[in-house]
Amino acid sequence: MPVHLHRFLSRASSTALAGSLALTAVGCGDDEEPPPKKDPPVSTACAEFGFDDGASYETGLSPYASAGGDMDGDGKGDLLVANHSDGTLTFLKGLGNGGFLAQGALEAGDGPAAVSMGDLNGDGSLDAVVANQLSDDISVIFGGPVPSNVGSYSAGTQPIWVSTIDLDGDTDLDVVVANGTGTSVGMLLGDGTGIFAPAVPIDVGGVPKSVALADFDKDGLGDIAVTRVGNILAVLRGTGGGAFAEPVTYTTGTTPYSVIAGEFSRDGKLDIAVANGESNDISVFLGAADGTFAEGIRYAVGEDPKNISAGDLNCDGVTDLAVANYITNTVSVLLGGGTPFQDAIHYTTKLGPRSVVVADFNGDERGDMAVTNAGDETVSILVNTSK
């Protein structure tokens, strides 16, 4: 079942699709020259494939993460950026032509580190949940003509990643955060109005780094995939009512950060991809129908990959990956259609990219990229020029 180009009009994307932050402190990186742009290794559905630099937009201090979706209900994709050092969120209103208009800052908690979008209150507009690392809580942002912070909930100790899905089978979105200390993730069950129950800790067997949520075994219940200290991917199958089976573990590369779920091998089964910060590669775990996964396949990317995102970048209906590489100031693009991906193609970014969002920002049916750059406190757009 091909995965078609992600559009902003009805759903969200995040650097967490799931997710979108890294766990180490922000620095300016090295002065090493990034890899040059390269031609794709094989022909694609587009006769010409590539990206050009678009506009850049200022953020707050130390932007760690971003997510994209139509938050203000005008049918155009917006961006929400979590600024770790000043406790704010930068809202960039999408204009539908690839450009954005800054709408000022929203207040978050202390040290916002991750953001995820979804319709939390059932009104048809996208909302957002923000994990605040230093105040140990999440902020809930309701969408609308003027998005607003409507409150916060305790989430555990040092929440550093956040994702949303229906976990208990009531069709309402729930929230899971990865807590940077201890060995648990925090689950907050939603009631469909944007109100959440107190966080319930779920032991994942090690210190979590990031989390992605999906129904891997397609039994109608949300499951949890979490990267852990010790180079581990742990998958917990939902068993109903917000309960989970014991974690099943898989080996990643060194120091896994971001994790996402998607259909990468075109077989109708959900797969997992993980960005490995110290081994400078990603691990791709191909899924089976029962929710288990094969041994990870490794692909080299740039140095210190912090975040991974997915979408169709070369107009062939197949999911591709984009990886933000913090030290080399690049985004690595891995086109789908290989086994399951081709070798990475590298594109230069601004300083210190920490997250990347893949979506069609200008309505041309081509996946563009929005890169959050901590080093110069901007979001920069890479416009897809494929023809």
Image: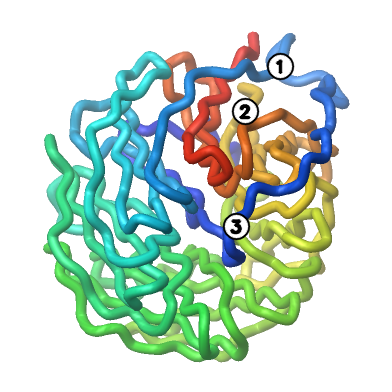
The answer to which of marks 3 and 1 sits earlier in the sequence is: 1
Quarter of the rendering containing residue 385: top right
* Residue 369 image offset from top left, x and y in percent: 55, 31
Mark 2 and mark 1 in contact? Answer it, CB < 8 Å: yes
Q: CA distance from mark 2 to mark 3?
A: 19 Å
- Left or right, 330 with respect to 182, comes to right
Quarter of the rendering containing residue 201: bottom left
Q: Nearer the viewer, residue 371 or 43?
A: 371
Amino acid identity at mark 1 = Phe
Amino acid identity at mark 3 = Leu
Which of labels 3 and 1 is toward the front? 1
Q: CA distance from mark 2 to mark 1?
A: 9 Å
* Residue 136 image offset from top left, x and y in percent: 35, 78
- Left or right, 114 with respect to 40, comes to left
Q: Which mark is residue 270?
A: 3
Determine whether 333 is above or below 194 in the image: above
**Quadrant showing the C terminus:** top right
Residue at 55 percent across and 80 percent down: it is: 236
Residue at 44 percent across and 84 percent down: it is: 239
- Residue holding disc 1: 49
- The answer to whether residue 221 is visible is no
The answer to which of marks 2 and 1 sits earlier in the sequence is: 1
- Label 3: few (<14), some or many (≥20) within 10 Å? many
Amino acid identity at mark 2 = Leu
Tag 1 secondary structure: loop
- Label 1: few (<14), some or many (≥20) within 10 Å? some
- Residue holding disc 2: 313
